[in-house]
Image (cartoon, rainbow, N blue to C red):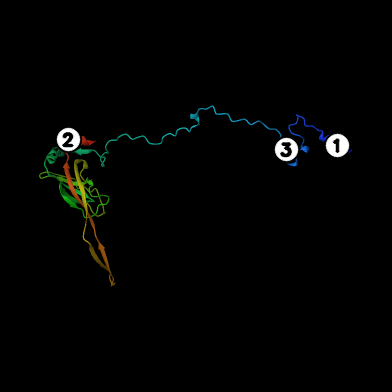
Amino acid sequence: MRTHSILRAALDIRWTPSSQFPPTFLLPWRAQLHQSAHSTQFQPEIPPQPSQQPLQSSLPSPIPSTRPAPASPSKSPPSSTGKPLVLSKSLQQLLPHLTAQKPHYITAHIHRFPYLLTQGDTLRLPFHMHGVSPGDVLRLNRASLLGSRDYTLKAGTTSTENYDGKRTGEPNYLDERLFECRARVMAVDSGPMVEKIKTKRRQRKEKHVRSKHRYTVLRVMEVKVKGLEELERGAEQLILQ
């Protein structure tokens, strides 16, 4: 009777609003583990409030442009010599006569080899010039002699260039601002096939070597000697002695 009274007393225990959950001994075994593992205090979930900032603030800031500013148009590059053009009194007196008397001839240097040329000549170089193709216009800016029928302008004979260590007395070159010589690449010519037999001493073997060389063909389009007025307009630094 005593045990029945205890069970009835336990069953008569009612749940009070002071506690959020019923007593643990009345819950199943899994619920008891869950109740003991986690806290019984719950907080209401607060929904995220919309941001009050404008939409533009959420966008990434514009990246500054790294493209360089367009370069201002520069003047024509100066002469490769970088020195002022000096004209003596005799040159000032005779240069107009040389300019007026045509046709002109020129001794142009290509890879230190001199070639006597005039307008309309066809020059077959003894080598193949690399980096050019038929139709290109080349300016020959190395010359040691300019002349006409009665007048000749010649550079000095002081040694200025020494290519192989043996040649001496190389002439100076005239200032390239005094003249204009242009040549057009016409074609690339090929020589005949040459077969050469090479032997060695005390050996019966013979080596046959075949070679076919190529040559560049130029045609002189213009040979012009500039006058005093043109030199004064074109030259940045002109000294009249």
User: For numbered disc 2, what is the local secondary structure?
Assistant: helix
Query: Tag on residue 35?
Result: 3
User: For numbered disc 3, what is the local secondary structure?
Assistant: helix
Q: Looking at the picture, which amino acid does disc 2 mark?
A: Glu
Who is closer to the viewer here, 192 or 110?
192
- Image coords of residue 15 (percent x, y): 77, 32
> Relative to 18, is 129 on the left or the right?
left
- Residue count near mark 2 (Cα–Cα under 10 Å), binned few <14, some 14–19, many ≥20: few
- Marks 3 and 1 sit apart, C-alpha to C-alpha, by 26 Å
- Image coords of residue 192 (percent x, y): 21, 60
Q: In which quarter of the image is the N terminus?
A: top right
Position of residue 7 relative to residue 123, above or below, is above
> Relative to 96, is 159 on the left or the right?
right
- Marks 3 and 2 sit apart, C-alpha to C-alpha, by 109 Å
Q: Which of marks 1 and 2 is in front?
A: 1
Q: In which quarter of the image is residue 189?
A: bottom left
- Marks 1 and 2 sit apart, C-alpha to C-alpha, by 135 Å
Label 1, on which residue? Answer: 6
| Of callouts 3 and 1, the N-terminal one | 1
Q: In which quarter of the image is residue 44?
A: top right
- Image coords of residue 215 (percent x, y): 22, 55
- Residue count near mark 1 (Cα–Cα under 10 Å), binned few <14, some 14–19, many ≥20: few
Label 2, on which residue? Answer: 229
- Image coords of residue 28 (percent x, y): 75, 40
